[in-house]
Every structure is written in C-alpha cells, then in structure tokens.
Amino acid sequence: MAENDVAVQQDAAYGTRTAVSTSGGALRTWATAGYRWLLLVFLLAGAVQIFLAGLGVFRLQDNGLEAPAGDSAFAPHRALGFAMAGIALLILVSALAARVGARAIILSAVLVLLISIVQSLLAGLGEDTAVYGGLHALDGLLIIGIAGYLYGSAIASRRGAGKRR
C-alpha cells in the first residue's frame, strides 16, 4: 500500500466499514516514538527536580536562610523547571503529530499549562506566602502524576498495538 492510500477498517461489532488514511505514516510513527521517549525523559527529569528542590532547601538552611543564598541554592531547580516546560511543549507537539487521542492531547496541554504558568506563579507567590510554596510542591506532584499517566497509557497502547499485529 502506498503512503497516500486509504485503508478500509472493518468494525466487527457494528458491521461498519470506515476509510482510514495511512498518509503520513512515517511521521506519525516517529512522533509516537518521540512522544513516549519525551515522556520518559520528563519523568526522569521530574525525579531529578525533586532531588534538586530538597538539595536547595538544605543548602539554603546551611547558608542561614538568606535571600541571596536562596537564589543560588535553587538555581539548578529553577533551570531544570524551565527545561521541563520546554520538554512539556515538545510532548504536546508530538502528541498532536502522533494523534494519540483526545484525552492524551488534553492532558499534554494541561501539563504545559501547569508547568509553564502555574508553577512559576506559585513559586513567585510562595516567596511571600508559604502556603503558595506548598501548593507549588503539590502542583509538581500533579505534573509528575499526569506525565506518569500519559507514559503508562502510551506504553499500554504500544503493547496493545503489538498484540493486534
């Protein structure tokens, strides 16, 4: 079958036939693989991010809780957070290209919003009010949970596709 051909998919339960385009198959395959790998990298970066937050807290404590020490103590945590926001954007783009489904695309968009906007907002507000700092940490856990769900779904879908072949 050529790249621009249309395949006919038979739905056994309803007896209907649906035309399915196979164009862009290579792009979709690469995007799907990229989506899975980006999610894995994001999750690993999330584990490092938690370590860096703890390191920053105890480094700050060692330096006497001064504001200038706080900037340097949390610099790696802040830098990785911005890098993770970029990775989240790449996850969204690859989810769209791979056409992974509405739920995964919506959750990928939520991931981008949470890590790029909400995290920065809560971190800034947390400098004046500790409750927002606590919400910053909880939002981080929510972000890791969403990424974990997306990764698990992507792996399960890959295994399911392998069984159908």
Image (cartoon, rainbow, N blue to C red):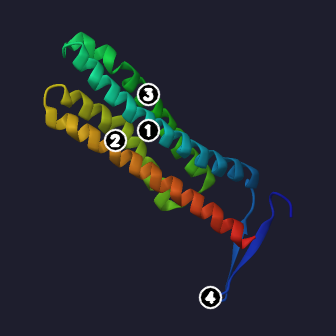
Q: Are marks 1 and 2 in contact (CB under 8 Å)?
A: yes
Which numbered mark, 4 or 3, is in the foreground of this view?
A: 3
| Residue 46, position as x, y percentages in the image | 43, 38
Mark 3: which secondary structure? helix
Q: CA distance from mark 1 to mark 4?
A: 42 Å
Mark 1: which secondary structure? helix
User: Residue visible at 47% across and 29% down?
Assistant: 83
Q: Amino acid at mark 4?
A: Ala
Mark 4: which secondary structure? loop
Rendered position, 154 above or below 147: below
Residue highlighted by disc 1: 46
Name the disc covering residue 80, or none: 3
Mark 2: which secondary structure? helix
Q: Is residue 29 left or right of residue 45?
A: right
Label 1 neighbour load within 10 Å: few <14, some 14-19, many 20+:
many
**Sequence-first tag of 3 and 2:** 3
